[in-house]
Amino acid sequence: MELQLGTAKADITPLAAVPLAGFAVRQNKPYEGIRSRLYARVLYLRQQAEGSAMRQAVIVSADLLWWGSDRMPRIRQTLAERFGLAPEAIILNGTHNHSGPQTSFGFHRLLGQADVGYVDDLERKLVQAIAAAAANIEPVTIEKGEGLSGIGVQRRKYVDGRVIGGPNPEGPVDPEVVVLRFRTEKGAVKAVAVHYACHPVTTNENVVSAEFSGKAMESLERRLGGDAVCLFLQGACGDINIFKESAPAELVADRDIVDYFGLLLADTVGDVLEGPMRVLKPVPLEGRTVALPLRLKPLETRAELEALAAAGESPYDEWAEAMLRNPDGRPDRLLLELTRLDVAEGLSLLAMNAEVVVEYGLYVKAVSAGNVLPLPYSNGMIGYVPTQKQIAHGGYEPVLSTYYFHMPGRFDESVEDAMRAGLADMAGTGTSGRHERLTEGEAGGTFKA
């Protein structure tokens, strides 16, 4: 069974000085400069099915925080009309870059307000890039290899029953770097996809940057030469930050530290590419999507919401005002959209429209024997999905973030059981009914350089 691939790379750097997304400290101010360009990189997959049917799918990696849920219906309609792409055959992944523009119009202004002109232009460039990829499609073989990286670190510590922020080298992390190489019939490298779980938060300066993930992909593209396109596919990094403290002490400027970690990741990928890699046999190119309901805790009373709104303390005031505008329409659960795309034996992608913590990413890999790669920050964004332990201890992911995401309530403790059941079912491993919690480190553990 033959798989065909087309690739494209589109510059999506904002032309106007718009607010950047991801850090409240920037106070929603327009960016002050451009340090590196932002790109959307496209893999357009096609396969001739039996008879005259043609299967196709598209995988996009963009140097963005995420793709906005409020824009996904329009994007899907456009891609269906323009290319005949089904919703379950579309994966739009954000690298979770905190130094690019906002793409959603439904969140707190301090996450960065989206600019209509930029988002409209972004979606036009997306369509153009997919068309460009479809125009250079050709048969490819797929190879898979793995490496290890210690540039990511757990960011939650538990001290005396409380959670505090900061690097926790003993906490759960996913050190695996999965590398996918696509070669043409002549042996040329057409594309490389790199899957790793780590927040691109090396810098909070108010300048446009593709962060360490973008630096790594640019370096790999230069090393490979030709027209090779290298994509960074973000994993479950909800509680994993870049281990900035591990950078050499002589590196002081953020731009140098970004480059340092980007080149470290590129070197790891380069080592994998130079070593033995497994050839994967294509399977029928198929996708499926399910909506997984995740229960929310009861919302504050109207009196409590009014008090929060009147207090004028950010981010609670703006959130409370948003809740008061629609008190009767508040849902008691949010829907997590899971999209699985099968590409080859030993290679499926599981997209999620949420910010998912590493414990769930490790679980997906564990129950699928590493054959399914978790891709949060894909096809929209509903907010953080924490574990039961994280909910019990509080902190940014289960509590404070909900105000920035304008979530209509915090997740109930039942979210973990629902997540593990849904993820196991979508991983297709036949493990339904065995959704026990993984203890810290059980599936991934820590990484020592």
Image: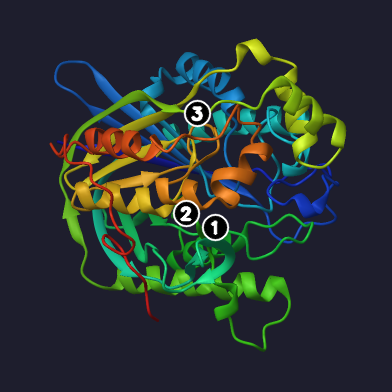
Assess disc 3: are there few (<14), some (14-19) or many (≥20) residues with their C-alpha within 10 Å of its C-alpha: some
Inter-mark Cα distance, 3 to 1: 26 Å
Tell me the quarter of the image containing the N terminus: top left
Q: Can you say whether 93 is above or below 267 in the image?
A: above
The three-letter code of the residue at mark 1 reads His
Residue 330 % position (x, y): 60, 17
Whichever of callouts 3 and 2 sits on the residue coming sooner in the sequence is 2
Assess disc 2: are there few (<14), some (14-19) or many (≥20) residues with their C-alpha within 10 Å of its C-alpha: many
Tell me the quarter of the image containing the C terminus: bottom left
Which residue occupies the foreground of this view, 58 or 373?
373
Cβ atoms under marks 3 and 2 closer than 8 Å: no
Which residue occupies the foreground of this view, 172 or 83?
172
Q: Which residue is mark 2?
A: 237
Cβ atoms under marks 1 and 2 closer than 8 Å: yes
Q: Secondary structure at mark 1?
A: loop
Assess disc 1: are there few (<14), some (14-19) or many (≥20) residues with their C-alpha within 10 Å of its C-alpha: many
Q: Secondary structure at mark 3?
A: loop
Whichever of callouts 3 and 1 sits on the residue coming sooner in the sequence is 1
Residue 243 visible somewhere in the drawing: yes
Residue under the image location 19 percent in, 37 percent down: 2
Residue 224 % position (x, y): 43, 65
Left or right: where 371 falls relative to 84: left
Q: Which residue is mark 3?
A: 296
Residue 335 % position (x, y): 45, 25
The three-letter code of the residue at mark 3 reads Leu
Q: Nearer the viewer, mark 3 or mark 1?
A: 3
Q: Which residue is mark 1?
A: 199
Residue under the image location 45 percent in, 42 percent down: 376
Residue 433 % position (x, y): 16, 35
Inter-mark Cα distance, 3 to 2: 22 Å
Left or right: where 391 falls relative to 26: left
